[in-house]
Amino acid sequence: METWDAIRARRNVRQYDGRPLARADLERILEAGRRAPSSTNWQPWHFVVVTDRERLRELAGVWRGAGHVALSAASIALVGAEPQDDLHASWLQYDFGQATAYLMLAAADLGIGSGHAYVSDQAEARRVLGLPEDHFCPYLVALGYPADRPLRPIEHPDRRPFDDVVHWDRW
């Protein structure tokens, strides 16, 4: 898929058809996340890939909106060290957002659906993922082939009109 097509085809997918993902596809998605830009090339992330069904069920319990994680073929936990100061805390959120977007676009490029989730229960995430005490998991990206329809460019997305969003030179 071309980049523009992957951008237009990407949508949140939270129902998966049960097919496993090829290791090579997972590695390509992870490589995209690894290559995401970060503040001063800091690269604050680690990725924990979960494919074990029981562990996916447990991981789904880290936030009330993460039920789709239990049904995914694989989920990627984005993990980082606790920030040392406010500056790094602000960088971290932006950088993790970049990595999340790269993971999800790479998945779309392969025809693999993705659905992101926030992590509110850090103690449970640490337990399930075996994280060190000084690390946390802000986000999950669940992956799988869409159960309803394959990914394809969406011609009329449910988005605000272009002219409501884009301003040229001034507001």
Image: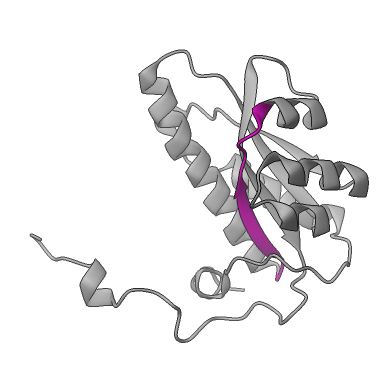
Q: Is residue 118 above or below residue 3?
A: above
In this view, which residue lies farthest toward the front? 64
In this view, which residue lies farthest toward the bottom? 155
Does residue 119 appear to the left or right of 83 in the view shown? Answer: right
- Residue at position x 91%, y 45% in the image: 54
Q: Magenta part of the protein: which range?
A: 111-122
Residue 13: image location, x then y, percent: 66, 67
In this view, which residue lies farthest toward the left? 170
- The residue nearer to you, when weighing 138 against 94, is 138
- Residue at position x 57%, y 69% in the image: 10
Q: Quadrant of the N terminus?
A: bottom right
Asked whether the viewer can see residue 61, the reply is yes
- The residue nearer to you, when weighing 136 against 100, is 136
Residue 117: image location, x then y, percent: 62, 49
Instruction: Please name the colour scheme applied to the rendered image.
Output: one colour
- Residue at position x 65%, y 77% in the image: 151
Q: Is residue 80 above or below residue 14?
A: above
Q: Is residue 160 above or below residue 149?
A: above
- The residue nearer to you, when weighing 136 against 60, is 60
Q: Is residue 7 above or below residue 118?
A: below
Residue 86: image location, x then y, percent: 37, 19
Residue 97: image location, x then y, percent: 49, 44
Q: Is residue 132 magenta?
A: no
The answer to which image quadrant residue 146 occupies is bottom right
